[in-house]
Amino acid sequence: MQIRKVIGIAVPTLVFSFLAGQTPIQAAAPENKPVAVAKAKSVNPKSGKLKFDTSAVPVSAEAIQVAIAAALTKEDGARYRAGGTGPNSFDCSGLVLWAYEQAGVSLPHGTRSLLPIVMPISREDLLPGDLVFSGRSGSGIQHVALYIGDNKVIHATYASASRANQVRIDDLDGSWVMVHKAYGRVVQ
């Protein structure tokens, strides 16, 4: 498999190929591919607290490549819209679920719905395809971004004085960031 650099990020060329008039996303994620559904955490019967389902495994490298490539197709062309799930407007979790949906992985909409179903990881363990959850200082989690490697994320961000209302790539610790509160790996 060949690797192609897209804005400085290595992405397999497979996801950029066109087959018989299909979009790159259709070419990379055939319709007959089974849909994987992310597993939720289970409740510990003794403590009543949520615990991660240890039988869950991370989604495949191929699914991650397709999800990242899908998200990259929306950079600067798609707009932020609260509740948006694509294909031309997204909120932060809508972009993540749409991108993974192109890879055959079903995720829930909503940042708070995503957090319980991902494998908790540390910042040091971040790999392309992982999720970065953040929020304002002193409050809960309000935002999720898709880590694409090379210390960069792609995310749907709303307009402010310093940024446009769009899907865009930013440095992990760039000016967009609130406070990183959790990191997670998508599992099936």
Image (cartoon, rainbow, N blue to C red):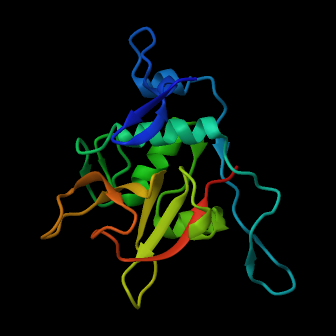
Vertical comparison of 31 with 9: above or below: above
- Pick whichever, 24 or 85, lies toward us: 24
The x, y position of residue 74, in whole percent, is 32, 41
Q: Residue at x 43, y 37 (%)?
A: 70
Q: Residue at x 44, y 58 (%)?
A: 151
Vertical comparison of 71 with 175: above or below: above
The x, y position of residue 149, in whole percent, is 48, 51
Q: Which residue lies most toward the top here?
A: 20
Quadrant of the drawing holding the N terminus: top right
Residue 91 visible to an observer of this rendering: no
Residue 45 visible to an observer of this rendering: yes
The x, y position of residue 119, in whole percent, is 67, 63
Locate residue 60: give its quadrant. top right
Q: Residue at x 58, y 46 (%)?
A: 106
The x, y position of residue 140, in whole percent, is 45, 82
Q: Which residue lies most toward the bottom here?
A: 138
Vertical comparison of 49 with 62: above or below: below
- Pick whichever, 114 or 66, lies toward us: 66
